[in-house]
Amino acid sequence: MTNPYLKQYLMTAGPTPLPPAVSQVMAEPMLYHRAPAFIEVYARVLARLKLVFQTANEVQVFSASGSGAMESAVANLVRPSEPALVASCGKFGERWAELCDAYGAQTIHWETEWGRKVDSGELDRKLGDHDAVEVVFTTLSETSTGVVNDIRELTEVAHRHGALIVVDAVSAMGAVPLPQDEWGVDVVVSGSQKALMAPPGLGFASANEAALERAAAAPGRRFYFDWERTVKGQRKDPPDSPFTPAVGLVGALDVALGLIADEGLEAVYERHRLLGHATREAARALELDTLGETDENANVVTAIALPDSIDGTKVPKLMRDRFGITIAGGQGHLKGKIARIAHCGYFGAFDIVVTVAGLEMTLRELGHELELGAGVAAAQRVFLEAGAPVSSPG
């Protein structure tokens, strides 16, 4: 029997916790998707997405997960038997290669060691060796490792070689700065269930005119994910969806984006920066390494290397079952080697403090000697030095 008094803390990078106002709006009566009441909400969501993506593009909305948004990019930009370059540095970057293979591309999969960033100089050399590549696929925040890539540099390199760049920002949109238009990023895809603080089920694709032109030049092989069809509907006045949208999810996203707008995008980024910094400082105080090089821009999830002296596969289960704290373990060859603590979306200072306390007790239970409270104190110092404990929105 589940202990009703054991409070639950969801500390994964997706799905993430929902602000109460977001949960509450989903209990309201269903709206007809062609009715004025919903069209007003839909139009507001489309406008607010542009602010978060920092773009004048139409941010296309699909009833799909972030992987669906990724597939829309491949379906519209990849041509059978033509080369496409995938620059990955973790589990989710590999999905680009799987999608390109599924759509018949001549996939050039360049894999960077997990825990390291995609190197712009190496990308320059790869594109020099493969000068027929017209599309590059990569990742902003690699959720499996916590690494955040320098998309501005990678975009400059891709464009220097005449290639479009497509960026998976599923976990990082709303947590890590990605001014799409300012940096000239051709396509950005994301999802609703991470830093945007909405339930799973909505995928987004923001494509600039160069990407839309390439898609239009290669019609066919897609239907639901057809960008031309979706953009045409969203550009109408009032905007229209070519298919029945996920009405309840759009309403939830409307409220979540309103909270982000009220907080202010720069303040949102700063909150995530403090949460990430506090988590890394807690790990350091516990004499635990983080995966890869320390990066103060890695503010989506922190991957903490677990002591070799314990069975790391037991850490997520014990934290969940004993303390009510759900974190993620490692994936692939990192299973049992790292613990991933998220801080993207509806998180505040005390979520981090509680999670660090739970991690300390878990490691002690599994036989690792440490000073209880050392990580908690380190996180507290970060928040107090910032002026006040950081609050989540809502």
Image: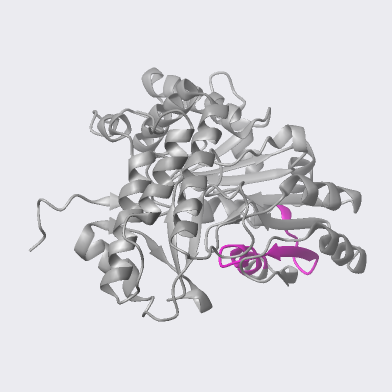
Residue 85 drawn in magenta: yes
The residue furthest front is 371
The answer, for residue 201, to whether it is visible in the render is no
Instruction: Where is residue 267? Give x, y as percent.
Output: 53, 28
The answer, for residue 116, to whether it is visible in the render is yes
In the shown orientation, is residue 210 left or right of residue 138? right
Q: Which residue does the image show at 49% across and 35% down from the upper left?
A: 271
Q: Nearer the viewer, residue 350 or 53?
A: 350
Relative to 56, does residue 278 appear above or below in the rendering? below
Q: Which residue does the image show at 75% across and 66% down from the upper left?
A: 80
In the shown orientation, is residue 294 left or right of residue 67? right
Instruction: Where is residue 57? Give x, y as percent.
Output: 67, 31
Of the 4 image quadrants, the one containing the N terminus is bottom left
Q: Nearer the viewer, residue 300 or 273?
A: 273
Q: Nearer the viewer, residue 217 or 21?
A: 21
Residue 154 drawn in magenta: no
Instruction: Where is residue 45? Give x, y as percent.
Output: 49, 27
User: Which stretch appears magenta?
Assistant: 77-100
Instruction: Where is residue 217? Give x, y as percent.
Output: 79, 48
Relative to 124, does residue 300 appear above or below in the rendering? above
Relative to 143, does residue 18 appear above or below in the rendering? above
Number of callouts? 0
Q: Which residue does the image show at 35% across and 74% down from the upper left?
A: 368
